[in-house]
Amino acid sequence: MKQTAGEKLFNGFNIVFLGGLALLCLYPFLYTLSLSFSTAAEANREGFHFFPRAVSLASYQMVLSNPDILRGYVNTITRTLLGTALTLVATCVAAYPLARKNLPHRSAITFFIVFTMIFSGGLVPGYLLIKNLGLINSIWALIIPTLITAFNVIIMKNFFDAIPESLAESARIDGANEWSILFRIYIPLSKPVLATVALWTAVMHWNSWFDAMLYITDDRKQVLQTFLQRIVIESSTQMMELGITNSSVTGFTTETVKAATIILTILPIICIYPFLQKYFVKGVMMGGVKE
Amino acid sequence: MTDSTHSRRKKISLLPRGRCNIDLWLMTVPVVLFFLIFNYIPMAGMVIAFKDYNLGDGILHSAWAGMENFVRLFGSSDFPNVIRNTLTISLLRLSFGFFAPVILALMLNELRQQVYKRVIQTLSYLPYFFSWVILSGIFLMLFSGSGPANMFIKLLGAKPVAFLTNDVWFITVLIATGIWQSAGWGAVIYLAALSGINPVLYEAATIDGATRWQQMLTITLPCLAPTMVTLFILSLGGILTAGFDQIYNMYNPLVYNVSDIIDTYVLRRMMDLDMDLAAAAGMFKSVVGLILIVGANTLSKKLTQGEQSVW
Amino acid sequence: MNRNALIFTFVTICAVVLIVALIPTRPRTDINAPLPPSPVNWSIVQDDTNNTLTISWLGIPGYEAARPGSWIQQMLEERFNIRLDTIFMDLNAFAKRRPLILCGGQAPDVMWDGFPTSVRNNIENRFIMSVPYSVILQHAPTYVSLLNRYGKEAWLYSYYRGENFGLPTFIEGANRPRVGCWRKDWLDAVGITKVPDTVESMHEALRRFRYNDPDGNGKKDTYGWNPYIGHWSLAFSELFAAYDLLAFDFVERDGKITWGGILPECREALATLRRWYEEELLDPDFVVDSQQNQVTERKFQNGRAGYLFPLDFYTAYDTSDPASMSGILQALNPNAKIIPAPLLKNRDGQPRGQAWGGAAHVLQFGRQLEQQPEKVIRVLEMIEAITKDKTLYLESTSGREGLHWTKQAGAGIELLPPWNTDKQLRGAQMLAPGGFGCMFFYPAGLDYTYQTAYRDPAYLRFEDTFKKPEWGLSNPLGKSEVVPSAGRYLNDLRNFQMTVFVEMVIGKRPIASFDEYVTEWKQRGGAVLLQEANDMYETMQQIFNQVGAGETRND
């Protein structure tokens, strides 16, 4: 295919512009990474941090010998996997009827759901509900309240709306029930939005700490982000010292320990996006659709 | 759409009827129950906005305060300024920040090198994972009086700029860094929408001799429109939420007058456990959000003859 | 969607708002009305020490490394025949989860609280019970006498509507003022031999730091001072103290209470700062730098300024510790050397410095203990025993001598292995030697009375040379938050004041407009606070007389 001069110019500009933008976006990561590997003296030096000029692994050694952090990893991974899987299924089931034109009152039901995005009862009733359901200190307190969110349902419904009703109709004539239309036709055609909702949910679960801070009182069941909050936001020396089983290890400062904690916390979650990107390939949705 | 218009004229019936399948109801009922239990029941707590809430007495037994909490909220001489700041920041965020992810997604979509595209895509959403505590440190260093941004300006021979202490510049920095932080993340949904476009459409357009720019205008954008409209309408709900975390970590006493938003104002005036004031502020924000969302949805439905609407 | 549903929603919301608006407004709680009487008849309460009592205990937040069943906990449990159900919270949880567990009806039996406003809320919300002074005096007389000596203002935190709620606490060392530090090598380089101790000599040193190239790099890239204003209590506080005031707190003038930030002396101090800023002695980035974590320190470490405030713990000056301020400075610049800054002298030639004051916090008792008041008595007896018995005090704050630590001649406490290297283990057992020690179970600080013999002599030398308690300037009401309308106005006013002061210093607002600022400050609620503070000051003496603190002075 031939390109016009204008298109070539645009392509060049596009590549350079996006490249520059990506580098800008990379800087906080590089900064934190470099700080996390720096020696104490290096970390206290002013100016840009791209690459550590003097390398120390002490901060990582310290964070990784913190028993709370390691348990937090396990709890966060459990929460994320379980929460994402359940949310995906539940969101599909919630969104599908709303996208079907033969559900009576579907627009009232949609409004009923959207309304929950705008109004909320606040902390106290939420806490009392979780407490009365007996979910305090249970991983379900972190999963169930956000199992279905209005935003996910609306986005999913939006994508389902684009699937021609005729597909469902012909399947019904072939004797399929609604469940099999959902799982055999709609879901396979909606991989991009499923990947999006999965990413949103996984990231939400991975990053959440406020609910865990309220509902989980036992540190053995606590999630990683709560410990991150203690170290990074509250600068808790007690929390940091949990990682010191031999105080002859030096070469870290509170700042390098914070940086190492941040890197260890975000690294796993940023890695899932590249894997989900294969579901964003063009034409995936319309593959089986003949208009 | 047609169904519900008909059903309005008929007797209201909750039972499945006509072509509706019992399975659809089986799917809907638990979902409605879920929202009832986890969202609507706790909403009873909103009533504390109208109470002199005593935690020991509980929500039901606390004394009614009428509109007193709202009087406390609106009564301060600071409040008009706070509303103005909140709306300014929020509207600027909406008008620039809303389109940034769309443009980013479109630009990414035009990249032909798949590996490069994936790398850029992944890098662009990195800032989303850093809290403002970290990011603000980086930006305050970058834009401070003696920071790299001003060093560069001085190299060019210009006068240094008070990026962080001048009212207008501060808001500019706030909006720009806010967009930078979230554009890549926001683009994810548009990239998903883009992958839903039938390639046959592009092939046909190419045969008709349409340029890439024309293809973008006539095929890509219309296909993104439903997602854009939905997200726009939903984002109106948060019009009075101007980004507390970012502002709280970036502002300073010299720009309080332009950066004092509802959330910082409530935080400052709220005594420990003074939940009724927070509830009043939350209710105020919600009601404004509801009016805007309902208005926008109705408008969108009118303009598109019922094609584009959230509900 | 059907329009009916929309209309219905709107009508419902409007109706609710209207109906509620029509409900007559009840005045908020009258703070002068007496409270319902306590159901406890203290004269007949008996505590049989043979009974094991289980007490849930929410201590000071921040013991994240602690584990239930720590050594200190077990020691106290055995000694006082109690079972402690410890609740550890981080700062976030303390701010956000604690109110929720209170709402859920799970108030702990014993609950620490650091803020007078929060104690009041707990009283108003009926989460905590009243404990008369007579009961406290009966079971903890030694504790009361020390409290009255070091921090009697704490009674203002626990007294409310004519009754006493909980046990006020004190920290002896908080009566000492805070100090900063100077770059000694810079002072030497610019030819200043006497470390500045007046506003004038400070000015001269800062001026030379800016103009005489103290780091000898041939560039004019150094400032005198990068003031940290991130918290009101630290903003220029050493300079304000030289004018005998706390700018963001109540101060006493001629037997009346007034606000430091509206006094004519404050205007003078601001004019001085304005002059210094004009002469470029202050780093112009100070406002933004203060918003960030440790940037002020980092700039000082990197030789951008020659004076830093505060730096008031003696270990900061220990060059052998690479993590101390001295150690960090020397790693970046081998010639760097710091010395503590003497307090600036006021116009009478008296050194003055801002001090928190010894009045600290309140240990509250959950209202459910009205049914089991013997638990309150057991806790009071425990506090009294720890106060009276030096060995027990050291054990409950730092661990046992010979088991966890030993005393070295001419030095402080020396930890024994494995406690000396394994901080994880130490944290889990709540052993925190030195400083205040573990304050979870005994939240008062007898850091000088009992620990003098156990402290590093270098520490005591530092404290007695630079931080004499009689130089400290503290709020006559303890904390400004004690006045009833503080929750409504105080943060707003401090914010407003901070903006005005910073604008005056950098020249955005003329010093000449000081009087207009004072008028506005009063209009924005300052007048109410002043009135309430003066009312409180008058009734304060009555409270002090009631608690037997009428005659004692803080020293």
Image (cartoon, helix red, strand yellow):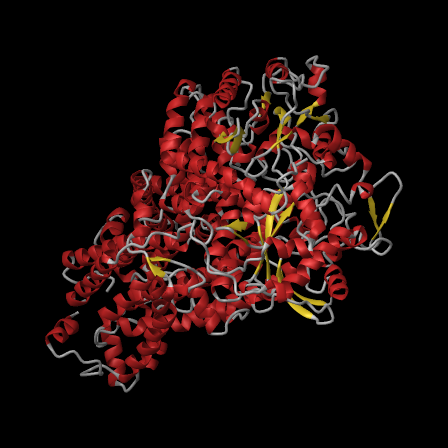
Foreground pick, C538 / C250: C538
- Residue at 77% x, 33% y: name it: C319
Q: Furthest residue to the front?
A: C43
Decide if residue B259 is on the left or right side of residue C546: left
Depth order, front residue of B70/B285:
B70
Residue B235 on image: x %, y %: 31, 53
Give the side of residue B235 with respect to residue C262, left or right.
left
Position above or below: C361 against A218: above
* Whether residue C276 is situated above or below residue B11 in the rendered picture: above
Q: How many marks?
A: 0
Pick the residue in front: C63 or C383: C383
Single out the residue that lies furthest toward the bottom: A175
User: Residue B222: x and y, percent?
Assistant: 24, 55
Where C416 sits versus A171, above or below?
A: above
At which x and y percent is residue A43?
A: 64, 38
Residue at left offset 30%, top offset 50%: B70
Residue C166 image position (x, y, % from top left): 58, 55
Q: In this orientation, does residue A163 appear?
A: yes
Q: Nearer the viewer, residue B288 or A66?
A: B288
Q: Along the horizontal axis of the image, is C98 left or right of B107?
A: right
Q: Can residue A278 be seen in this view?
A: no
Q: In which quarter of the image is the C terminus of chain A?
A: bottom left
Q: Which residue: 48% across, 66% down?
A: C104
Query: Against B7, is B209 above or below?
Result: above
Quadrant in the rendering for residue A113: bottom left
| Residue at the limit of the structure toward the right, as seen here | C409
